[in-house]
Amino acid sequence: MTIKVCIAGATGWVGKPLSKAVFQAEDLRLVGAVARTTQGQALGEIIGEPGLNLTIRGSVEQALQAPADVFVDFTRADAVKANVLAAIRGGAHVVIGSSGLADGDFAEIHQAALEQKVGVIAAGNFAISAVLLQSFACQAAKYLRHWEIIDYASDAKVDAPSGTARELAYRLSEVSQPEVTIPIDATLGPKESRGATLNASQVHSLRLPSYMISVEVLFGAPDERLTIRHDSGSGADPYIQGALLAIRKVGQYSGLVRGLDRIMD
């Protein structure tokens, strides 16, 4: 069965190569595209696929006038929640690749998806190496009781922490809560210097020119340390296969699934 796909952020950093990959896949059909800055233009011309006859729309509601089985969001932190809820109301399954959602947002999305009987897959990072970092960190958290997270991104990234760091903190909290020798509230000096507390983990977000999205979790124990780090490159290729996997599997679920590893064989 062919899966009909609508992509929001279709001409963005991940959206553009993902649109191309969906168009080229035999079991997928690209039926909708959203990009406000290029609305009204032909998507095929922008992504280098002249055989694709699809006009870019300026809103999710407009794009979903052509029924889609799966809606994919790779937009911005300030747009993703409204986009996702609109797609759920339209009866589409959803794959979330945008960052900026908090735990409360995920809870609302999960409830809306259950009510509409659709699936939602959200991944802080669709790269397989990022999935492995998460898995290794959760294993380490079973044995090492102290850890903190460092989140790196460029100075142009608006949201903090990144989706990758948020998901990592969430998954670590499912294993255990880190021990803190001196409570954050007992810090002498600005408490903000100890980072933000997210799902009990301290998270420190750096936003500097020339940095790409990276995440690092540091574990400490008496006389030993462990660092696990994932670094993104300058291209979006590592995200494509994970996103395609989510598109193909999201229809098997009802409600929210957080983490690409939970749908992998």
Image (tube, rainbow, N blue to C red):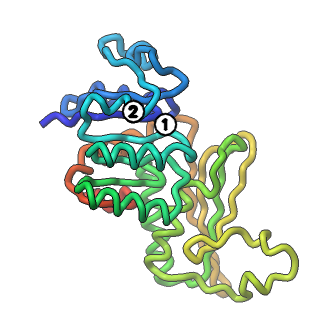
**On-image quarter of the N terminus:** top left
- Which quadrant of the view contains residue 132? bottom left
**Farthest right residue in view:** 189
Q: Which of 241 and 99 is in front in this view?
A: 99
Q: Position of residue 174 (x, y in %)?
A: 44, 76
In the shown orientation, is residue 241 left or right of residue 227? left
Callout 2 environment at 10 Å: few (<14), some (14 to 19), or many (20+)? many
In the image, 174 versus 221, the foreground residue is 174
Left or right of 228? Residue 202 is: right
Whole-percent x, y for residue 52 in the image:
31, 16
Pick the residue in front: 22 or 95.
Answer: 95
Give the numbered dot on residue 236.
1
- Tell me the residue at 74%/46% (across/down): 208
> In what element is the residue under mark 2?
helix
Mark 1 or 2 closer to N-term?
Answer: 2
Residue 164 drawn above or below residue 68: below
Nearer to us in this view, 125 or 113? 113
Q: Residue 18 carries which label?
A: 2
Q: How far apart are marks 1 and 2 (CA)?
A: 9 Å
> Does 57 appear above or below 105?
above
The amino acid marked with disc number 2 is Leu
Tag 1–tag 2 contact (CB < 8 Å): yes
Q: State which quadrant residue 239 falls in.
A: top left
